[in-house]
């Protein structure tokens, strides 16, 4: 049984999937933490685009 556990931990087939899921979880966490700051930044950018588009 100990050999089976060692083989399980050495197996690397699913590591790419786990890494991608962890990256996605971290990104979602960052978005949730900085949601208000991101929202304010996007609104500021769009208001500048809107105000300066009339000059073109």
Image (cartoon, rainbow, N blue to C red):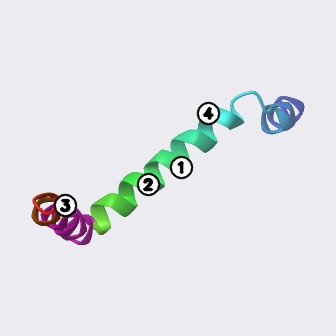
The residue under label 1 is: 23
45 sits left or right of 51 in the view: right
The residue under label 3 is: 49
Discs 1, 2 touching: Cβ within 8 Å: yes
Q: How far apart are marks 2 and 4 (CA)?
A: 15 Å
| Count of residue discs | 4
The residue under label 4 is: 17
Q: What element carries label 4?
A: helix
Q: Is the magenta stretch mostly helix, strand or loop?
A: helix
Discs 3, 2 touching: Cβ within 8 Å: no
The one of 6 and 39 positioned closer to us in this rendering: 39
Where is the C terminus found, in terms of image quarters? bottom left
Q: How far apart are marks 3 and 4 (CA)?
A: 39 Å
The residue under label 2 is: 27
User: Up-down: is 1 above or below 46?
Assistant: above
Give the image location of residue 42, x and y in percent: 22, 62
Give the image location of residue 27, x and y in percent: 43, 54
Q: Nearer the viewer, mark 2 or mark 4?
A: 2
Q: How far apart are marks 1 and 4 (CA)?
A: 10 Å
41 sits left or right of 4 in the view: left
């Amino acid at each position: 049984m100990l050999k089976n556990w060692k083989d399980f931990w050495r197996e690397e087939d699913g590591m790419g999937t786990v890494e991608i899921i962890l990256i996605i979880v971290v990104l979602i966490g960052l978005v949730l933490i900085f949601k208000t700051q991101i929202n304010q930044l996007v609104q500021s950018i769009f208001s500048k685009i809107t105000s300066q588009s009339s000059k073109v």
